[in-house]
Amino acid sequence: MSLIEEFVHTISIKGQLDTHKLVELILAKLRRHTIAEAGSIFMVENLVDPTPEDNLVCYSIQNDKINVDPQRFSIPQNESSIAGYVATTGEFLEIDNLYALDASVPYSFNPSFDRENNYHSKSMLSFPLKNIEGTVIGVVQLINHFDIEKNDITAFKLEHLDDAKDLMPVIGLIIERCALKEKLSA
């Protein structure tokens, strides 16, 4: 069974989920696959009819090292933050050290979460989720890949980036379909 088939199968056997529970499941599955210590998924405010003016809302935040408040918050969809940059450009980012970003990049890492929670984010893989029309509807951020052989936090591997590129359209379509079903049944 391919990674995409496995992913779709896992989600389909969970039955009818609302969008928030679906996003929680997707993030957990992505984190397990990439051995990511933490992660988040931001979705545009209006999943059914997204616009570039929509804020990005944190639908899921997970962390194996610390307890995190699942409180929803939003950030602007612009190039100043990593999630905003990915949403705006549709690019994939693989960052080895969040605290050593090149000064030439337009986005920045906000260390306030780390300071407030006595945590240290290091590596990140961030990629867009797109709907059937190719519009970005969300952003996945996987944080701190744990390398079992080195017993340490390292950069994400090229295979993780390749897997993300394969899964991105499938995940986006699954989430969009769920949001459409919710809107139609409301």
Image (tube, grey):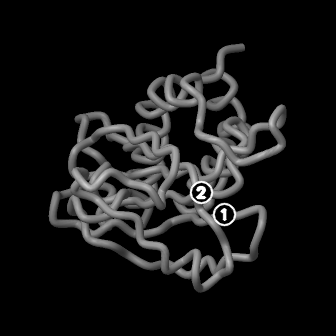
Rendered position, 31 above or below 112? above
Which numbered circle lies on residue 92? Answer: none
Front residue of this view, candidates 69 and 182:
69
Q: Residues within 10 Å of mark 1 (few under 14, many from 20)?
A: many
Q: Gap between marks 1 and 2, in whole Å? A: 5 Å
Q: Are marks 1 and 2 in contact (CB under 8 Å)?
A: yes
Quadrant of the image containing the N terminus: top right
- Which residue matches tag 1? 62
Residue flagged by tag 1: what amino acid is it?
Gln
Expressed as whole percent of the image width and height from the top left, the position of residue 115 reads 58, 81
Q: Secondary structure at mark 2?
A: strand
Expressed as whole percent of the image width and height from the top left, the position of residue 77 reads 24, 63
Q: Secondary structure at mark 1?
A: strand
Indicate left or right for 124 with 65 as reference: left
Q: Earlier in the sequence, mark 1 or mark 2?
A: 2
Report which quarter residue 128 is drawn in: top left
Quadrant of the image containing the C terminus: bottom left
- Which residue matches tag 2? 39
Rendered position, 59 above or below 26? below
Front residue of this view, candidates 166 and 155:
155
Which residue is most to the top?
1
Q: Residue at x 38, y 52 (%)?
A: 138
Indicate left or right for 179 with 11 as reference: left
Q: Residue at x 57, y 64 (%)?
A: 60
Q: Residue at x 66, y 72 (%)?
A: 119
Indicate left or right for 143 with 175 as reference: right
Residue flagged by tag 2: what amino acid is it?
Gly
Rendered position, 45 above or below 86? below
